[in-house]
Image: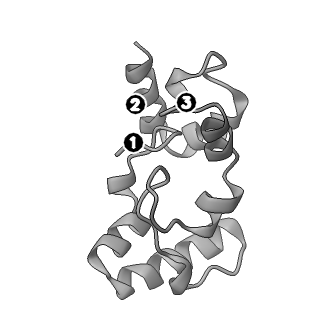
Amino acid sequence: MIGYCGLGCVECKAFIATKNDDNTLRAKVAEEWAKLNNAPIKPEHINCTGCKSMGVKTYYCDQLCEIRKCATERHLSTCAGCTDYPCSSLDPIFRSAPQAKATLDELKK
């Protein structure tokens, strides 16, 4: 499961916490993400079945992620399929998770 941005959903701590119904991990992720984003993220917010799934997603991924919005509007399976790839919207992801760029670059080939 590769997200639109190239991140591996199955490696995401929110996905893992949801899949395993792990409240300890939810609490840890909420604390990390709250500090990282300077936002009031609570353990009950940490539920996600993947950004391309029909199931539950974190609020950020579901409502705020510009990459997800753009890719779904363009009917793309990932950003690698976009004629504008790579675009500046991906820069923050690539800085924090270089493996996402490597994944998309491989898919682009």
Q: Classify mark 1: helix, strand or loop.
A: loop
What crowding class fits label 1: few (fewer than 14 Cα within 10 Å), some (14-19), or many (20 or more)?
some
Horizontally, is 49 left or right of 5 in the view? left
Q: Is residue 31 positioned above or below 90 on the image?
A: below
Disc 3, disc 1: CB below 8 Å?
Answer: no
Please name the amino acid that badge 2 sits on. Answer: Thr
What crowding class fits label 2: few (fewer than 14 Cα within 10 Å), some (14-19), or many (20 or more)?
some
- The nearer-to-camera label among 3 and 2 is 3
Residue receiving disc 2: 103
Who's the residue at 32% across and 82% down the image? Answer: 22
Q: Is residue 3 positioned above or below 83 on the image?
A: below
Please name the amino acid that badge 3 sits on. Answer: Cys
Residue receiving disc 1: 2
Q: Classify mark 2: helix, strand or loop.
A: helix
| Quarter of the image where the C terminus is located | top left
Who's the residue at 34% across and 55% down the image? Answer: 11
Q: Classify mark 3: helix, strand or loop.
A: helix
Quadrant of the rendered image containing residue 107: top left
Give residue 9's position: percent from left, percent from top. Answer: 39, 52
| CA distance separating discs 3 and 2 | 10 Å
